[in-house]
Image (spheres, rainbow, N blue to C red):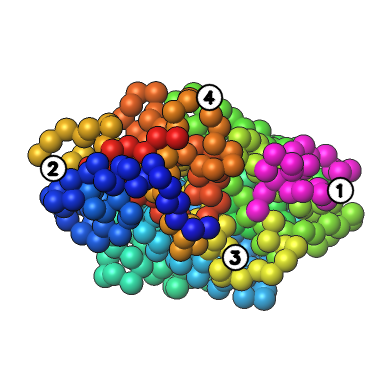
C-alpha cells in the first residue's frame, strides 16, 4: 500500500508556512520527532507518536509438565519477551502469572499422592509500567519477566496437572487490584488439560483414576470469565491462546479430558472477551458432546506452525484488539492545539498511509480508512479500514502531525 498523495494534500501543503518551527522534543510522553518524514513535513510544526490510554496486560502462562514437550515452554517464554519488548507496549502495565507453582497433597481418590495443583495467590511478576526499559535493561518489569522465565521451567511433578481455574481466579484478583484507570487484559497461554477440580465442589468430569470430578468443567471457567468481563466498574477482557496439545480429546478421561479441548478453549475465549472474538467463530458454547469448532473463538496455534514469532504476533494482536483505535491528542509545548491543523497517518508492515478526516460522521470509511475526533473532541479515532489495519498488524504505528491544515475527505 503506497502513501496517498492527492490534490487536496498538495493544496494543503501550499497553504502551510514552509518556514514553520519544528519541535523535536515535544509530544505525549516525549514522543516528538525531529525526522518529519511525512508529506506534510513542509508545514508541520511537530510530529508525535500517538499513544493510547493506560492499560494493564497480565500474561497467564501454563506451567504444566507437558509444556516441556517440543520446546513449547521455550517458544512461549521467548515470545512473551519478544512481544512485550515492542515500543507499542511502553505505555502499558505488564505482569506475569504462571501455574502450577508446586505440589499439594493429592485427593483420596489417588491415595494422597502429591500433585502439581498449587496456584500462587499473586503474580510472580507484579503489574508495572513497562516504560522504555526493555528486557535487556538492568531493571524494569520487562527485565523481571525475562529473568523469571529464564530461571524457571515447567513443573516436573507427578502427572500433568493444570489448575487453570485457580490461576485465572488469582489473575482476575490482581487486575481488579490494579489502581489505574484503563483497560484490564488477561492473556492465557495454555496447552490444555484443565484439571485439579477434585479439590473444589464445582461440577466436573471423572478421570480414569476414579476421581469423580477432577477434570474441570469448562463452563465453570466460562462463568468466571463472563462475570469478570461484565463487571460494571473494572471489566476484564480475557484472551486465550491454545498452543500444541490444546487440541486433545480422550473419551475415557485418562490422559486428557473427556471433551474436545479446542471447543472448551473456544467457549472460554468467547466468554472472556465476547466483543473481540472473530464474528464467524462457531465455538461460542461448550457442551461435552460438542466437537471441535470449524472456526475457533480463541487463538488456535494447534492447527499450523507454532513458533516464537507466531505467538509473539498473537500477543501483539491482543493489545490492538482491546485498546482499539482511539489515541490521545498531543499536548504541544507553549500553546493550544488547533483542531483544524491536525493530521494523522499510520504505518503497517513498513508502508505509511496518509489519512483524511471524514467530513460526514456517517461515513464508515470501509474501503479507504479515515479518522475523526472522539465525541469529546480530546482524542483521535481511526475509522473503518484504518482501524482494521492497525488492529490487525502487530507492529502498527500511528502518528499525529500538527501544524498543517487538516486534510478532509
Label drawn at residue 291: 1
Q: Secondary structure beneath disc 1?
A: loop
Tell me the chief SS of the magenta region.
Answer: loop
Marks 3 and 1, how far apart in space? 25 Å
Please identify, in this view, whether the residue under mark 4 or under mark 2 is nearer the observer: 4
Q: Are marks 2 and 1 in contact (CB under 8 Å)?
A: no
Q: Is residue 245 visible?
A: no
- Residue wearing tag 2: 333
Marks 3 and 2, how far apart in space? 41 Å
Please identify, in this view, whether the residue under mark 2 or under mark 1 is nearer the observer: 2
In the rendered image, residue 89, in percent from the top left (x then y), is placed at 39, 54
Q: Nearer the viewer, residue 133 or 328?
A: 328
In the rendered image, residue 212, in percent from the top left (x then y), is placed at 81, 46
Q: Quadrant of residue 249?
A: bottom right
Q: Are marks 3 and 1 in contact (CB under 8 Å)?
A: no
| Range drawn in magenta | 278-299
Amino acid at each position: 500500500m503506497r502513501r496517498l498523495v492527492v490534490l487536496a494534500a498538495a493544496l494543503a501543503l501550499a497553504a502551510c508556512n514552509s518556514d514553520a518551527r519544528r519541535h523535536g522534543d515535544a509530544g505525549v510522553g516525549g514522543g516528538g520527532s525531529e525526522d518529519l518524514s511525512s508529506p506534510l513535513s513542509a508545514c508541520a510544526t511537530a510530529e508525535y507518536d500517538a499513544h493510547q490510554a493506560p492499560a494493564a496486560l497480565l500474561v497467564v502462562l501454563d506451567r504444566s509438565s507437558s509444556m516441556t514437550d517440543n520446546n513449547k515452554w521455550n517458544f512461549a517464554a521467548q515470545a512473551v519477551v519478544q512481544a512485550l519488548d515492542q515500543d507499542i507496549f511502553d505505555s502499558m502495565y505488564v505482569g506475569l502469572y504462571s501455574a502450577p507453582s508446586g505440589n499439594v497433597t493429592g485427593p483420596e481418590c489417588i491415595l494422597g499422592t502429591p500433585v502439581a495443583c498449587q496456584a500462587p495467590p499473586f503474580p510472580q511478576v507484579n503489574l508495572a509500567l513497562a516504560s522504555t526499559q526493555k528486557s535487556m535493561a538492568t531493571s524494569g518489569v520487562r527485565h523481571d519477566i525475562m529473568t523469571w522465565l529464564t530461571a524457571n521451567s515447567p513443573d516436573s511433578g507427578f502427572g500433568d496437572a493444570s489448575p487453570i481455574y485457580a490461576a485465572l481466579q488469582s489473575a482476575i484478583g490482581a487486575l481488579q487490584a490494579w489502581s489505574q484507570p484503563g483497560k484490564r487484559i488477561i492473556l492465557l497461554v495454555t496447552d490444555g488439560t484443565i484439571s485439579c477440580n477434585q479439590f473444589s465442589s464445582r461440577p466436573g468430569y471423572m478421570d480414569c483414576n476414579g476421581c469423580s470430578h477432577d477434570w474441570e468443567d469448562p463452563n465453570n471457567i466460562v462463568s468466571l470469565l463472563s462475570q469478570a468481563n461484565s463487571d460494571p466498574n473494572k471489566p476484564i477482557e480475557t484472551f486465550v491462546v491454545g498452543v500444541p496439545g490444546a487440541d486433545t480429546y480422550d473419551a475415557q478421561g485418562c490422559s486428557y479430558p473427556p471433551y474436545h479441548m479446542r471447543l472448551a478453549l473456544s467457549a472460554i475465549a468467547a466468554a472472556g472477551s465476547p466483543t473481540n472474538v472473530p464474528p464467524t467463530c462457531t465455538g461460542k458454547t461448550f457442551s461435552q458432546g460438542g466437537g471441535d469448532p470449524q472456526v475457533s473463538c480463541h487463538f488456535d496455534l494447534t492447527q499450523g506452525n507454532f513458533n516464537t514469532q507466531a505467538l509473539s504476533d498473537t500477543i501483539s494482536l491482543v493489545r490492538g484488539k482491546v485498546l482499539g483505535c482511539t489515541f490521545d491528542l498531543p499536548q504541544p509545548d507553549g500553546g493550544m492545539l488547533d483542531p483544524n491543523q491536525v493530521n494523522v497517518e499510520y504505518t503497517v508492515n513498513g508502508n505509511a498511509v496518509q489519512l483524511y478526516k471524514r467530513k460526514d460522521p456517517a461515513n464508515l470509511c470501509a474501503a479507504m480508512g479515515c479518522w475523526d475526533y472522539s465525541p469529546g473532541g480530546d482524542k483521535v479515532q481511526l475509522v473503518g479500514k484504518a482501524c482494521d489495519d492497525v488492529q490487525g498488524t502487530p507492529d502498527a504505528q500511528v502518528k499525529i502531525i500538527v501544524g498543517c491544515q487538516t486534510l478532509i475527505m
